[in-house]
Image (tube, rainbow, N blue to C red):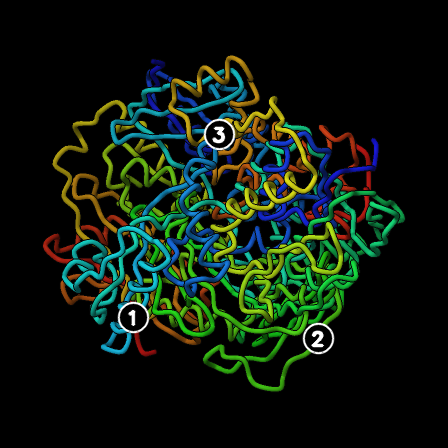
C-alpha cells in the first residue's frame, strides 16, 4: 500500500470519519490514522447520541452554525448510510420562574440561530404528553427537530462508506511526530511507520491540542471534561417519549433522560473536569449525582433496571468554541478541534465544510464514482418472521442465535468481522452482541469462538478493544 | 404447524425433569424439548465440581453426571428434542416460534413448560464504579472458559460475592494456578453453604472479607487492581477503610435473575420478588396451560430441588394437555409471604387441586432461633423452630393432606417468622 496521500485525517471518530467520507466525493487519495484498532473508540462511542436542534449555542459561533447545518442534513445522510435516526423531539423542563426565563432565552436564541418549530409548552401539555415526568415541572421548551441516533453506528457507517469509496483507514497508528518534507507532512507512528500527505487534518479529539503542537501549529488547550451515564434495560413501555433535558448551566446541557434508538433508556451525563484525558472511570459521586438529578425529572427511575454504566470524555477547548480552521502559520494543516457537544450533530456539516475547503485548495475534481449509499448488516432482531425464514434459507447461520438478549445471529457476527471488526467491542458496537441485559454473560465465549474461527487466531489473542485488553491468558489443554 | 402435547422450553435440569415426567404421564407421548445450546444439560455441564444429587440420588455427583442421568432417560425414551434452537416467541395461545439453522419453526403446544433458567447479575447491574477494562468476568463465564474450553483467565483474581458459586470458583481458580487474593462479601455473612466455606476457602487459605465492598475497578486495557472498603451495617462505605488490591481479574458472583423475557411475551404475570412467574401449586402460571419450574421460576441453591419441582410441573402440564377442563374455573387462595419471609413459591393454592405440595421460601435476613409459622384464618397450622435461617438458603415446608383438610378456603395462607 502506498503511503503517500493527498489528505490524511488524524483520528477516526465521528468527525474524522465524516470528513474522510466527504473527501471521497473528490478525486483525492485520502486516509485516516487511528491509534486504536477500530473507529469510534473515543468520545464517539460514549456520548448521549442526541441530534440537537441548535438553540443552545450562542449565535455567531461555529457551534451554532454547524449545529443547525448538521441538524438540517442529518436525516438525509442517515438515510444514505442506513443508520437509525429518530426525530423524537426534545423538551427542556423548567421547575421555577427563573428557569422559565431561561427557556424564553433559549427560545429567542434558537430563533436567531435559525431553529424551526421551537415552542414553550405549558405544564398541562407536558403532563399530557410525558405523563411520567415530575409534577413539579412548570413549563418546557419543545424542539420538534431534536432527535436521537446511535453515535458509534453512525461512525462505523461513515467509515464503511468511506472505505467503499476508496479511502484508507490505518489502525494502531499512534501519531508521535509530524515533520515537513517539502510540500508534504510526514506523520510518524509510535511503531515506526509513517505516512506522507499534502494536507493534514487534526481530528484527534481530546488529544487535538497535542497534535497541533506537534505540527508546530497554533497552541490551544483541550480540557477533558468527563460525563457519566447509566444504560437501563429495554422497558416494555418507554418512560419518556422525547429527549428530556433540564435547564442548562454554564457546565453544559445538564442531565438528560432519553430513549435510545435501540430501545434502552439513557440517563446522564454529569460534567467534571478531570486531570487525565484518558480517565474514563465512573465514580460513586458522579453516578449518585446523575441519578439524583435524573430522579428530579423522572421520579419512577429505578436502579433495578440499570444494565451498565459508562463515562465519556468531552474535548472542551479553551477557546469556548469549535476550532475549525487552517492554521495561519502551518499551511495545509487544518485543526478540527474542541468538538464537544453538539459535536455529533455538527459532525456531518463539518465534514462537508472541510471537504469543500480541501478540494478547493487542491483543485480536486469530483469523484464521479462516489456512491453515497451503504447498507447496514441485516439484523435478525429487526426482521419479520417471513424475512427471517428467507434469510435462513440463504444463510443458515442467520438461524443460529448467539446473543440471546439482543437476538444476534452468527451471520451478523461474521458479517461484522468481514467489514473490519477485530475486537469484541467492535462487534458489540456494530451488531449489539453482548450489549443486552446479560452484558455478554452468555454470548462472550461464543463470540470469541467465531472471532477465532474467522480471523484464524487463537482465542488468547482476542482482545476486548485492542492493545493489552486480552480476555484469556493461556491455553491449558487442547480439545 | 407441528403439534405437541407438551413443549418444554429449556433443556437444563428443570426442562429435562419436566419433560420426563410429562412423558410418563401422557398417553399420546408427544413431548418436545427445545434447547438453545449444543447439548442438553444446561449450565450443569460446566459445573464439574461435586456436590450434586445428595438429596435426590443420595450420592455425590458432579454437574455433568447429574445432568447425564436425565439426558440418558430422555434418549432411552426417545423423547424428541431440538438443540441449537432458539425460541423467539411464545403466544398466550401456546404457539411457539423457534429458529435454528434449518429455518423458522412454528409449533402448537397443548401445554408449555417454561424452564429457561436464569442469567447472572453483572458488574453493571450492581453499579460498580471504575474503568471498563478486560478481565472482568461473571462466575459463569469464567467457569465455562476454564472447565469447558480449557483456558486460564488471568493470574491474580478478586472474587466479588460469597454465595456458593463464588466460593466454588475461588477453589477452581486456585486449582488452575490463579491466585485468589480475596473473596469480597458486602453482607456480614456468607450466603454460601458452610461446607463450601471450609472446603473452598479455608482449605486453601483464601481470605473471606465480610462487610466489604468493591468500590472501584482500575486499569485501562486489562484490570490492574481493585479498591475495596469496609461497610457499616447500612452497607455504606466506612471512610478511610479503602484498600487497593493488585489483580488482573475480577469475578462477579453477585446473584442470579430468572430469564423471563419469553414469559413476558406470553403474557405471564411475574412476581417482583422472585423475578419469576406467579404460580399455583400445579406450577401453572397466570396463562392457562403455561407452567414454569426451575431457575426461571425462582433461583434455587440445590439442583435436587429443581428436579422435584420440575417433576410436579411436568406432571401437571401433562394433565392440562389431556384434560384442560380440569383447569377451567380455577379458584385460588393466596399464599402470602409476611414478616421475615422474602418470598414464597407457589404463591397460590388452586382449589381444583387440593393436594399435598411443598412450599419453598427464602427469608429476608440472617436469623437465629426463629420460628416459621404457617397460618390461615388467624389459626397457626404449622410451627417450625429453626436455629439458623439465612437468605442464601432456600427453605421448604411440606403442606400435607392433614393440613389441607384444616384449611378455611375463604382466607389466605400466611407464612411468616415469629418472635423476631
Category of crowding for the residue at label 1, using alpha-carbon neighbours closer than 10 angstroms: few (below 14), some (14–19), many (at least 20): some
Question: Which numbered marker is on residue A379?
Answer: 3
Kindly identify which chain the residue marked by label 3 belongs to: A
Name the residue rendered at 67%, 66% in the picture.
A277
Viewer-closest of A321 and A373? A321
Residue B339 seen anywhere in this rendered image of the structure: yes
Task: Single out the residue that lies furthest toward the bottom.
Answer: B240
Question: Which numbered marker is on residue A27?
Answer: none
Please tell me which of labels 1 and 2 falls first in the chain.
2
- Quarter of the rendering containing residue A337: bottom right
B234 w.r.t. B352: above or below: below
> Can you give x and y, in whole percent of width and height, for residue A424 in the image?
65, 43
> Can you give x and y, in whole percent of width and height, for residue B398 in the image?
33, 53
- Image check: B360 left or right of A394? left
Kindly identify which chain the residue marked by label 2 belongs to: B
A370 w.r.t. A300: above or below: above
Category of crowding for the residue at label 2, using alpha-carbon neighbours closer than 10 angstroms: few (below 14), some (14–19), many (at least 20): some
Tell me the distance, in whole angstroms, between the alpha carbons under discs 1 and 3. 48 Å
Viewer-closest of A349 and B56? A349
Look at discs 3 and 2 and give the one toward the viewer.
3
| Residue identifier under label 2 | B244
- Image check: B27 left or right of B199? left
Q: Secondary structure at mark 2?
A: strand
Name the residue rendered at 34%, 13% in the picture.
B1
Question: Which numbered marker is on residue B339?
Answer: 1
Residue B214 seen anywhere in this rendered image of the structure: no
Q: Secondary structure at mark 1?
A: loop
Task: Single out the residue that lies furthest toward the left.
Answer: B410
> Can you give x and y, in whole percent of width and height, for residue A164 in the image?
63, 27
Q: Quadrant of the C terminus of chain B?
A: bottom left
Name the residue rendered at 48%, 81% in the picture.
B233
Amino acid at each position: 500500500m502506498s503511503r503517500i496521500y493527498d489528505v490524511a485525517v488524524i483520528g477516526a471518530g465521528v468527525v474524522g470519519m465524516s470528513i474522510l467520507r466527504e473527501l471521497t466525493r473528490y478525486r483525492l487519495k485520502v486516509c485516516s490514522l487511528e491509534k486504536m484498532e477500530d473507529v469510534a473508540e473515543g468520545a464517539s462511542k460514549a456520548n448521549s447520541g442526541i441530534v440537537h436542534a441548535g438553540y443552545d449555542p450562542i449565535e455567531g459561533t461555529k457551534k451554532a452554525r454547524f449545529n443547525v447545518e448538521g441538524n438540517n442534513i442529518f436525516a438525509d445522510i442517515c438515510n444514505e448510510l442506513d443508520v437509525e435516526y429518530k426525530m423524537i423531539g426534545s423538551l427542556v423542563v423548567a421547575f421555577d420562574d427563573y428557569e422559565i426565563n431561561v427557556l424564553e432565552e433559549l427560545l429567542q436564541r434558537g430563533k436567531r440561530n435559525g431553529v424551526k418549530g421551537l415552542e414553550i409548552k405549558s405544564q398541562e401539555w407536558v403532563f399530557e404528553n410525558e405523563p411520567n415526568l415530575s409534577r413539579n415541572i412548570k413549563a418546557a421548551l419543545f424542539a420538534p427537530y431534536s432527535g436521537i441516533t446511535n453515535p458509534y453506528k453512525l461512525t462505523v457507517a461513515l467509515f464503511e462508506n468511506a472505505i467503499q469509496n476508496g479511502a484508507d483507514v490505518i489502525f494502531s497508528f499512534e501519531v508521535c511526530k509530524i515533520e515537513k518534507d517539502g510540500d508534504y507532512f510526514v506523520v510518524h507512528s509510535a511503531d515506526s511507520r509513517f505516512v506522507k500527505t499534502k494536507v493534514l487534518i487534526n481530528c484527534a479529539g481530546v488529544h487535538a491540542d497535542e497534535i497541533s503542537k506537534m505540527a508546530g501549529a497554533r497552541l490551544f488547550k483541550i480540557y477533558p471534561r468527563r460525563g457519566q451515564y447509566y444504560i437501563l434495560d429495554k422497558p416494555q413501555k418507554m418512560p419518556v417519549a422525547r429527549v428530556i433535558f433540564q435547564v442548562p448551566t454554564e457546565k453544559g446541557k445538564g442531565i438528560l433522560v432519553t430513549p435510545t434508538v435501540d430501545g434502552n433508556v439513557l440517563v446522564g451525563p454529569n460534567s467534571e473536569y478531570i486531570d487525565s484525558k484518558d480517565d474514563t472511570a465512573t465514580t460513586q459521586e458522579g453516578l449518585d449525582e446523575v441519578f439524583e438529578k435524573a430522579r428530579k425529572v423522572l421520579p419512577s427511575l429505578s436502579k433495578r433496571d440499570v444494565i451498565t454504566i459508562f463515562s465519556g470524555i468531552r474535548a472542551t477547548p479553551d477557546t469556548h468554541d469549535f476550532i475549525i480552521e487552517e492554521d495561519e502559520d502551518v499551511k495545509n494543516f487544518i485543526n478540527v478541534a474542541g468538538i464537544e457537544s453538539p459535536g455529533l450533530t455538527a459532525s456531518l456539516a463539518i465534514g462537508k465544510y472541510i471537504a469543500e475547503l480541501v478540494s478547493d485548495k487542491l483543485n480536486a475534481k469530483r469523484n464521479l464514482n462516489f456512491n453515497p449509499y451503504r447498507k447496514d448488516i441485516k439484523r435478525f432482531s429487526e426482521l419479520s418472521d417471513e424475512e427471517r425464514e428467507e434469510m435462513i434459507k440463504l444463510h443458515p447461520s442467520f438461524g443460529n442465535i448467539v446473543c440471546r438478549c439482543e437476538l444476534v445471529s452468527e451471520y451478523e457476527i461474521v458479517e461484522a468481522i468481514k467489514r473490519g471488526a477485530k475486537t469484541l467491542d467492535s462487534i458489540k458496537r456494530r451488531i449489539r452482541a453482548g450489549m443486552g441485559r446479560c452484558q455478554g454473560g452468555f454470548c462472550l465465549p461464543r463470540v470469541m469462538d467465531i472471532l477465532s474461527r474467522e480471523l484464524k487466531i487463537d482465542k488468547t489473542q482476542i482482545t476486548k478493544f485492542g492493545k493489552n485488553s486480552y480476555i484469556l491468558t493461556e491455553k491449558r489443554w487442547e480439545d | 404447524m407441528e403439534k405437541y402435547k407438551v413443549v418444554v422450553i429449556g433443556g437444563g435440569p428443570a426442562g429435562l425433569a419436566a419433560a420426563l415426567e410429562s412423558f410418563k404421564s401422557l398417553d399420546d407421548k408427544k413431548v418436545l424439548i427445545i434447547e438453545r445450546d449444543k447439548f442438553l444439560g444446561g449450565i450443569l455441564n460446566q459445573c464439574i465440581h461435586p456436590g450434586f444429587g445428595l438429596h435426590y440420588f443420595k450420592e455425590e455427583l458432579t454437574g455433568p453426571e447429574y445432568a447425564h442421568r436425565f439426558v440418558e432417560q430422555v434418549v432411552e425414551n426417545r423423547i424428541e428434542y431440538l438443540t441449537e434452537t432458539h425460541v423467539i416467541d411464545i403466544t398466550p395461545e401456546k404457539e411457539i416460534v423457534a429458529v435454528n439453522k434449518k429455518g423458522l419453526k412454528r409449533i402448537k403446544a397443548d401445554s408449555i413448560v417454561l424452564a429457561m433458567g436464569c442469567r447472572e447479575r453483572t458488574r453493571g447491574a450492581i453499579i460498580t464504579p471504575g474503568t471498563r477494562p478486560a478481565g472482568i468476568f461473571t462466575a459463569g463465564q469464567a467457569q465455562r472458559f476454564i472447565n469447558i474450553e480449557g483456558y486460564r483467565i488471568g493470574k491474580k483474581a478478586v472474587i466479588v460475592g460469597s454465595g456458593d458459586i463464588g466460593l466454588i470458583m475461588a477453589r477452581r481458580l486456585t486449582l488452575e494456578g490463579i491466585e485468589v487474593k480475596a473473596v469480597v462479601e458486602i453482607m456480614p455473612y456468607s450466603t454460601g453453604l458452610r461446607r463450601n466455606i471450609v472446603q473452598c476457602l479455608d482449605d486453601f487459605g483464601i481470605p473471606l472479607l465480610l462487610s466489604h465492598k468493591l468500590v472501584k475497578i482500575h486499569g485501562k486495557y486489562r484490570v490492574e487492581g481493585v479498591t475495596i472498603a469496609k461497610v457499616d451495617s447500612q452497607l455504606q462505605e466506612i471512610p478511610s477503610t479503602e484498600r487497593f488490591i493488585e489483580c488482573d481479574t475480577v469475578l462477579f458472583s453477585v446473584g442470579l435473575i430468572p430469564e423471563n423475557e419469553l414469559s413476558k411475551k406470553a403474557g405471564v404475570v411475574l412476581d417482583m420478588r422472585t423475578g419469576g412467574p406467579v404460580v399455583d401449586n400445579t406450577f401453572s402460571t397466570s396463562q392457562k396451560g403455561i407452567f414454569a419450574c426451575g431457575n426461571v421460576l425462582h433461583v434455587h441453591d440445590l439442583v435436587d430441588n429443581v428436579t422435584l419441582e420440575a417433576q410436579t410441573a411436568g406432571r401437571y402440564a401433562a394433565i392440562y394437555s389431556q384434560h384442560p377442563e380440569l383447569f377451567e374455573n380455577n379458584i385460588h387462595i393466596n399464599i402470602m409471604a409476611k414478616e421475615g419471609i422474602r418470598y414464597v413459591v407457589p404463591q397460590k393454592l388452586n382449589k381444583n387441586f387440593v393436594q399435598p405440595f411443598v412450599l419453598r421460601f427464602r427469608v429476608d435476613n440472617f436469623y437465629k432461633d426463629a420460628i416459621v409459622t404457617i397460618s390461615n384464618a388467624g389459626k397457626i397450622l404449622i410451627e417450625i423452630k429453626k436455629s439458623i435461617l439465612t437468605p442464601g438458603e432456600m427453605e421448604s415446608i411440606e403442606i400435607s393432606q392433614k393440613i389441607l383438610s384444616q384449611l378455611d378456603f375463604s382466607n389466605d395462607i400466611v407464612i411468616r417468622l415469629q418472635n423476631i
